[in-house]
Image (tube, coloured by chain):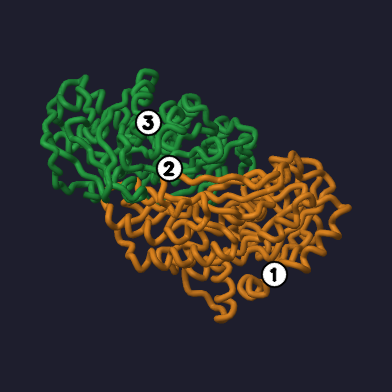
Chain colours: A orange, B green
Amino acid sequence: MTNSSSDRPSEFALIAQLFAPLADAPGAFGLLDDAAVIAPRAGHELIVTTDAVVEGVHFLADDPPELIAKKALRVNVSDLAAKGAEPLGYLLALSLPAHLSLEWLTAFAEGLRQDQRTFAMSLLGGDTTATPGPLSIAITAFGHVPVGQMIRRRGARVGDSVFVSGTVGDSGAGLDLLRGPRDCSHAVRDFLVHRYHEPRPRVELGLALRGVANAGLDVSDGLLADLGHMADASGVRIEIEAQRLPLSAALQAMWGDDLQARIRAATAGDDYELVFTVAPSRADGVMRLARNSTSISEIGRVVKGAGVVLLDDNGRAISTLKGGYTHF
Amino acid sequence: MTNSSSDRPSEFALIAQLFAPLADAPGAFGLLDDAAVIAPRAGHELIVTTDAVVEGVHFLADDPPELIAKKALRVNVSDLAAKGAEPLGYLLALSLPAHLSLEWLTAFAEGLRQDQRTFAMSLLGGDTTATPGPLSIAITAFGHVPVGQMIRRRGARVGDSVFVSGTVGDSGAGLDLLRGPRDCSHAVRDFLVHRYHEPRPRVELGLALRGVANAGLDVSDGLLADLGHMADASGVRIEIEAQRLPLSAALQAMWGDDLQARIRAATAGDDYELVFTVAPSRADGVMRLARNSTSISEIGRVVKGAGVVLLDDNGRAISTLKGGYTHF
């Protein structure tokens, strides 16, 4: 762990000690060097991705530190999952405001420790610096895929079916609940807030989709916005049937299940579910994958044209522009 | 380039377009995917390092954007150089305050473009997010080394000579000049401020030190603090002779060259010079390297014991505690 700033040296030395036990890969050198070594497994390539989360933007200041740590790591693991990669390790760049206590940081490290075990990853290195601003956590994550097997964003082909894992909109509803009092049961609240705090990267599903999915990505900006990226990159049009969007029972208890609720769910973002396209001949095989891991729903198809459209019950395109949904 | 936040989508789409031309490696996919692919060269390992820089901590808000970009990249390239790695590529996580203009960002991207050419690197991917705080730039850099040849922090051996490249203290003096009016010539000011804004990662020297240096790192926290890390990791004591520290003419014009000036230079930090140890039998060869790239000075030796000590002209240890210098 290097320290960019020497104005709080003894504090940063403590932090390095706190994180050193997380660096259990041989190439991490227990954080006692300036860089890490990664040698990809034979026949494999490294997949790398980076995502930063910022207090007040991606998490709230009073969120539990364990959960902030897990979310910072999981949004990156979710990218690895979407690409069909097996998680390997990560680098952590922390910008710390002065008010964070050692207790807070200890809990933060504990959250990382738990998730490293869950995802079989190791901390490979990092950097700690002071900031006069909010807490900011930038993680770079590494995974393995067999050479040439990364699931691409641009592979969607006309005729493909479009699938999504799990349910959409829960995280957005959870954030809504954290922002102010809403009328709902404890169970509904717990489920949705948990979905916001602890996204579940679909690593197993991603591995199973190698050589099966033609295109894939994880839903972070919102289902429709992210499918818009896929349509752009692939040079196709993607049609999604609102009625087929998978909504959790908790979300339906909050928002109902009418068209407005479905539009809201498809534009809420932060789902970290996988959305992917598959040739029709392989669609049955995909539904069988659902039995072994998360649920999977077929929600639309890839056609000629450009952009992404949401269709109502009568197959009419719904014209809507809303947060994150800029590709309509 | 992924965007963590959907509250400024059209701006972030512009930013992605701005950075896409920088992503000229095949595995970067022109930033049109969620992750990049890296396949290390045969017989080589990947060296990875991350360093974040924050406005108000590592650079000043009114520093030119090209120079901020270069410094953010170079502090990482310097880590690669210290490890004997050949630069390959980098990931960029940007946390942007709302006030930054497209002009500012265009100049920032131009700074990166120039430095990519200097160091033969490619942008491999990134993430842009909004922040209510200061501008923060987290870079993860990748380099190649032949398997097993990374220059380690912990390899210093009793009997080794200690060398440093270039001159020390210039960057600290440059920052001092930026913080308030000082009495000095334009030439002195230009030199020192330039040293602060544009560190020169010693990539060629790092490559030449593979198989030659027993231990190495780059000076970021301050020469003595960083040598303290090396001494700790190596289980040795490092003695530095104050009189042998290389000071630039500009620095001497500002601070003089007495013992106080030398202590200040050895604790100032942000030098991004390489400091390394070499067995006595190879010391002559090292001095020959100096003719081909940067200057190199022999400044001390590795002995039995612990910690780092600065010796005065009479060989007496100087007891001093000052910013970044906590290993005495």
Q: Indicate the chain on which mark 1 is placed.
A: A
Q: Residue at x 54, y 37 (%)?
A: B14
Residue A10, percent across and down? Answer: 27, 56
Q: Residue at x 84, y 50 (%)?
A: A279
Q: Is residue A165 visible?
A: yes
**Residue A253 located left or right of residue B99:** right
Between the residue at mark 2 and the residue at mark 3, the CA separation in whole angstroms equals 29 Å
Up the image or down, B34 lies above or below A244; here it is above
Q: Residue at x 66, y 52 (%)?
A: A85
SS at circle 1: loop
Q: Which residue is mark 2?
A: B152
> B208 or A189, which is in the foreground?
B208
Between the residue at mark 1 and the residue at mark 2, the CA separation in whole angstroms equals 59 Å
Residue A254, percent across and down? Answer: 61, 73
Mark 2, other Cα within 10 Å: few <14 / some 14–19 / many ≥20: many
SS at circle 3: helix
Up the image or down, B124 lies above or below A299; here it is above
**Mark 2: which amino acid?**
Arg
Q: Based on the displayed image, in which of its 4 quarters is residue B283 positioned?
A: top left
Q: Which residue is mark 1?
A: A257
> A38 or B323, which is in the foreground?
A38
Q: Residue at x 52, y 70 (%)?
A: A177
**Mark 3: which amino acid?**
Leu
SS at circle 2: loop
Q: Which residue is mark 3?
A: B67
Mark 1, other Cα within 10 Å: few <14 / some 14–19 / many ≥20: many
> B240 or B36, which is in the foreground?
B240
Q: Based on the displayed image, in which of its 4 quarters is residue A109 positioned?
A: bottom left
